[in-house]
Amino acid sequence: MSSHWDDATDETASGPADRLVGASADGEDQAVEAALRPKSLDEFVGQERVREQLDLVLKAALARGATADHVLLSGAPGLGKTTLSMIIAAEMGAPIRITSGPAIQHAGDLAAILSSLQEGEVLFLDEIHRMSRPAEEMLYMAMEDFRVDVIVGKGPGATAIPLELPPFTLVGATTRAGLLPPPLRDRFGFTAHMEFYAPAELERVIHRSAQLLDVEIEADGAAEIAGRSRGTPRIANRLLRRVRDYAQVKADGLITRDIAATALKVYEVDERGLDRLDRAVLEALLKLFGGGPVGLSTLAVAVGEERETVEEVAEPFLVREGLLARTPRGRVATPAAWAHLGLVPPQAGGPGSGQQGLFGA
């Protein structure tokens, strides 16, 4: 029951599913996460502020004998939104129904789900921002009044039949909270943003997962994996499994710092968590374009990837790490990018000096 990393997301948001450091969950991840998932807020690692606030919301609802307020969880993939929804249901002693925004393309799809809910049930709606507009408008009334109007017939002869719903708790999850319309966002009684994890928190996640997976790991081995996990528990658990494989085949099964570092070098994940795609983008930016600025389309051609792949898969992490900056003139490498690849930036005003006036020499 380590942690909580099974948020289903679209690949445009989290990258190709075969990336070792991608935050999307494939079939193997989902199976492992189900076994590692915590069952209560006390077992949940990290997100201290969210856990404390959510604990108050749930305990107050239980004391009143009422269903909990609707909850909106936002944040990057792999941080534990799905698991928190399951914990909410467990803490409230209620069943949970799981679906996703892309699966609800018509108001009738949502009406069928809502009409079959039991009193107090938790409805988890992943990627809620991708729900169709007609279903979204039906959800407004369901959340506020526990009622939906089912339209029967078409044209002038169509009639609306009101359908009363039992009280329920909606838990919405989104990787892009800004895409939610204000009327929907305002109907959630509690909203929480999931932050990336600190290395020390990821170490706790890794130790817990290792214990459940029956893997021997030393403290410095866990620290090495945590430092390359991009602040995401799902990635930490995935890297742990790959390092475990290496330790079983190439060593005696014990994960030390050296074993972890060697294994992750084999899998092309460097000490800051960059993989082949991330480094290819940086190397093209630095070696071919002198650090920029360079247009996104040009950069994508240089690395042999689609523009959307570079923009939505590689760039967010590089920007968050302070290795790349987006400017009105194009993408620009920071001094940290030059240092990370062991390269010397061109002198200001010299050949290939694309950063003059932005970051200096």
Image (cartoon, grey):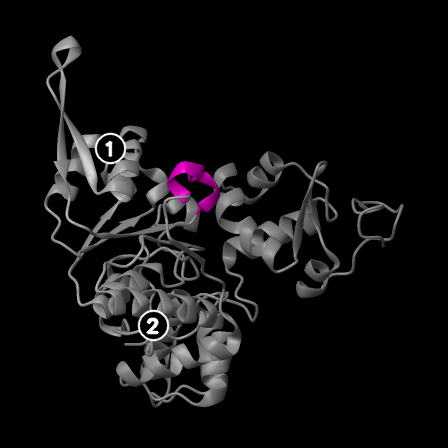
Residue depicted at 71% across the width and 36% down the height: 328
State the image coordinates of residue 176 (x, y, percent, origin top left).
45, 46
Vertical placement of residue 165 versus 74, above or below: above
Q: Quick check: is 198 in the magenta stretch?
A: no
Q: Which mark is residue 246?
A: none
Q: Secondary structure at mark 2?
A: loop
Q: Quick check: is 180 in the magenta stretch?
A: yes
Instruction: Determine if residue 205 is in view.
Output: yes
Q: Is residue 321 left or right of residue 181?
A: right
Tell me the amino acid under the disc marked 1: Gln
Q: Which residue is mark 2?
A: 3
Q: CA distance from mark 1 to mark 2?
A: 31 Å
Residue depicted at 23% across the width and 58% down the height: 67
Q: Which residue is mark 1?
A: 105
Residue depicted at 30% across the width and 35% down the height: 136
State the image coordinates of residue 62 (x, y, percent, origin top left).
25, 68
State the image coordinates of residue 289 (x, y, percent, origin top left).
71, 44
Q: Are marks 1 and 2 in contact (CB under 8 Å)?
A: no
Vertical placement of residue 199 versus 165, above or below: below
Query: Magenta segment range?
Result: 176-185
Q: Is residue 120 left or right of residue 273?
A: left
Residue depicted at 42% across the width and 51% down the height: 14
Q: Secondary structure at mark 1?
A: loop
Vertical placement of residue 25 versus 60, above or below: above
Quarter of the image containing the N terminus?
Answer: bottom left
Q: Nearer the viewer, residue 131 or 136?
A: 136
Residue sitting at the far top? 156
